[in-house]
Amino acid sequence: MREIVASKITEAVKNLCVNANIDLNKDVLSALNESLKTETSPIGREILRNIIKNAEIARREKLPLCQDTGLACVFVEIGQDVRIIDGTLAEALNEGVSRGYKAGYLRKSVTGDPIARKNTGDNTPAMVHTEIVPGEKIKIQLLAKGGGAENCSAIKMFMPSVSQEEISNFIVQTVETSGPNGCPPLIIGVGIGGSFDQAPLLAKKALLKPIGRRNSNSDTAAWEKELLKRINQTGIGPMGLGGKTTALAVHIEKKPCHISSLPVAVNINCHSHRYKEAII
């Protein structure tokens, strides 16, 4: 049994919050640069150049990539041979988010009550999802999820007789309905299967997959590629002002489901795709 001090988790989460908001991952930057090579719209190309420039300034000046510094969505894989001491996991994670958003001068965007709308003042509580896995390590993945893109997401409970084409239409229509509101170019996570509550979680976890890494199932990987092509043919383009670059990636995750239902969820993220991970 390996013991991990709670304060070590807190420090790791603090750093993830700051780094995710100021340092755009290389896979996202690479996808943006590749899109710049193929984008034909003059306005679209200018927007892509500005997005790339913004990322360079954010990293150099240690400034947030966007004024919406996101809701802290935290995915934790806990080794079954780990024991957390001197505190609880939930306390350690939320303290890390609180410290990170204060240290990085990041906007606090969490309301304690969804109706009263009073800000909690430190961007907590985080949205935490845990999974017990073999081993003696803790893996923490943090996604700083902006509200605008989150509002563009959707779920639909299909009947099991639905065709793959009908599912594809729902995914593309969700993107078309969002238009410029998700701040394209987008990263799109799709969750298929599970239950009503699990499909959206699958879709959000799909956003954590590096751009360029296809699904391990060849048929699903081909579907991801087909969806990306269709979405980029909508002409929405960078920031919704027209062009070929509406999305940078589509990632699909599947899970077994009940014989009488087929949940499909679409979770949209903006071009400021802020995610980081740490292993303790």
Image (cartoon, rainbow, N blue to C red):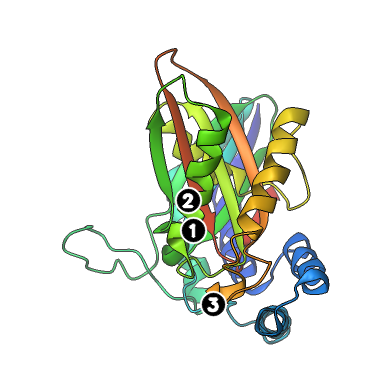
Q: Quadrant of residue 40?
A: bottom right
Counting from the top left corner in percent of width and height, residue 22 is at 64, 74
Left or right: residue 7 versus residue 134 is left
* Residue drawn at point x = 65 percent, y = 26 percent: 1
What residue sits right under mark 1 in the picture? 176
* Residue drawn at point x = 22 percent, y = 66 percent: 117
Vertical position of residue 255 compared to residue 239: above or below: above
Residue 179 vs residue 50, the one in the foreground: 179
Residue 271 vs residue 96, the one in the foreground: 271
**Residue type at the position of mark 3:** Cys
Instruction: Please report whichever mark, 1 or 3, sits nearer to the chain's N-terminal start.
Output: 3
What residue sits right under mark 3 in the picture? 66
Q: Which dot, 2 or 3, sits closer to the camera?
A: 2
Counting from the top left corner in percent of width and height, residue 194 is at 47, 25
Vertical position of residue 196 compared to residue 138: above or below: above
What residue sits right under mark 2 in the picture? 173
Element assignment for label 2: helix
